[in-house]
Image: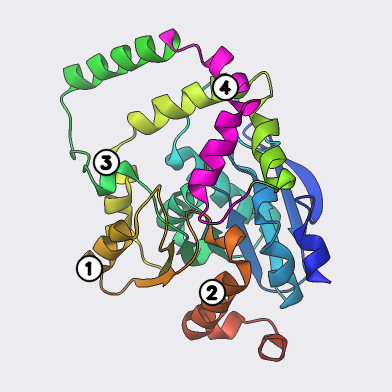
């Protein structure tokens, strides 16, 4: 039954939620009243990217939500600075207004950073965090705690000039319609995705919207100028919830060595490396991803496990 669902990105009941005047797309599947999981996609993706994981988790008895972060998927693509801080607040508001109870946050790549951010911003709404993997340039090149005002103003002006000069309105649609997109997608996977039309569509369609370039410009600006407190190193120190890192051994975008470095600096954090997959373990090896995820949730949050989940495994 699940294998048939695996072939489509059109999973769950889809709805629109308004946040701060922005239209946000989300979806849900699984039994009503069951413990909630909130799945957060990576850069350039959307809730559709959980096509192979969400149905399986719903079958295990979980109430599975997924949200298109602002600027991605079918959510609005605003012309404003956007960073993981803003996405974190979006997730917290979604938990309060839509889910209406604390949930486990599970994020792929940028979604993992967003999940971590939300857990630090409002920990009472988050039971645990799973990042698969956790990317942030600050893990390699830490952002200084403070910066002189003149330097920050100079960086802001310079960045505005650079982003205005970049012809993103031409580049983004062009890339989404050429083999460059396929090449980029293949870089995120260890196994071939040549015949995966659903994957290509779920990445290409949002990039072909007329507002995609302005949203990307806002993301570049917001992420480049975010405060040190919004970077992964600072968030990891502030986190008060259990954290599991799931890493593909063949991840070419964010090497496993980064995860090992995080684990070395924070021994209480769990790290599991999955062989035979790259940057998107939830989509490339969904069964093994879930086989790691659910026992970890049992050990850390056994009291919220769905009734009968042991029998489903």
The dominant secondary structure in magenta is: helix
Secondary structure under badge 2?
helix
Q: Nearer the viewer, mark 1 or mark 3?
A: 1
Secondary structure under badge 3?
helix
* Residue position marked by numbered label 2 in the rendering: 293
The C terminus - image quarter: bottom right
* Residue position marked by numbered label 3 in the rendering: 228
Query: How far apart are labels 1 and 3 at the CA level?
Result: 21 Å
Compare marks 2 and 4 and give the one earlier in the sequence.
Answer: 4
Q: Nearer the viewer, mark 2 or mark 3?
A: 2
Q: Which mark is residue 125?
A: none
Q: Are marks 1 and 3 in contact (CB under 8 Å)?
A: no
Query: Magenta stretch containing residue 166, yes or no?
Result: yes
Compare marks 1 and 3 and give the one earlier in the sequence.
Answer: 3
* Residue position marked by numbered label 4 in the rendering: 172
154 or 21, nearer to the observer: 154
Where is residue 143, by image quadrant?
Answer: top left
**Where is residue 169 drawn, in percent x and y?**
57, 14
Q: Which residues are magenta?
A: 165-193
Query: How far apart are labels 1 and 2 at the CA level?
Result: 21 Å
């Amino acid at each position: 039954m699940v294998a048939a669902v695996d072939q489509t990105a059109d999973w769950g009941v889809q709805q629109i939620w308004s946040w701060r005047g922005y239209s946000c797309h989300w979806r849900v599947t699984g039994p009503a009243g069951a413990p909630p999981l909130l799945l957060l996609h990576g850069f350039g993706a959307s809730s559709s990217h959980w096509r192979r994981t969400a149905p399986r988790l719903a079958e295990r008895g979980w109430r599975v939500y997924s949200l298109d972060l602002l600027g991605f998927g079918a959510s609005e693509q605003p012309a404003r600075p956007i960073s993981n801080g803003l996405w974190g607040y979006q997730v917290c508001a979604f938990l309060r207004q839509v889910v209406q109870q604390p949930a486990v946050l599970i994020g792929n790549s940028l979604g993992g950073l967003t999940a971590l951010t939300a857990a630090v911003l409002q920990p009472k709404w988050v039971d645990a965090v799973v990042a698969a993997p956790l990317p942030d340039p600050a893990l390699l090149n830490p952002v200084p705690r403070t910066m002189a005002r003149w330097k920050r103003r100079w960086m802001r002006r310079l960045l505005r000039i650079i982003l205005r000069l970049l012809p993103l309105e031409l580049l983004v649609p062009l890339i989404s319609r050429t083999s460059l997109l396929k090449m980029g997608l293949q870089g995120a996977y260890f196994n071939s995705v040549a015949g995966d039309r659903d994957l290509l569509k779920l990445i290409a369609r949002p990039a072909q919207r007329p507002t995609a370039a302005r949203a990307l410009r806002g993301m570049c600006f917001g992420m480049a100028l975010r405060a040190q407190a919004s970077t992964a190193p600072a968030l990891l120190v502030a986190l008060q919830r259990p954290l599991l890192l799931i890493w593909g051994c063949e991840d070419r975008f964010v090497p496993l060595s980064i995860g090992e470095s995080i684990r070395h600096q924070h021994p209480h954090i769990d790290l599991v490396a999955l062989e035979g997959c790259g940057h998107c373990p939830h989509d490339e090896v969904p069964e093994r991803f879930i086989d790691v995820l659910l026992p970890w949730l049992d050990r850390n949050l056994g009291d919220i496990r769905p009734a009968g989940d042991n029998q489903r495994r």
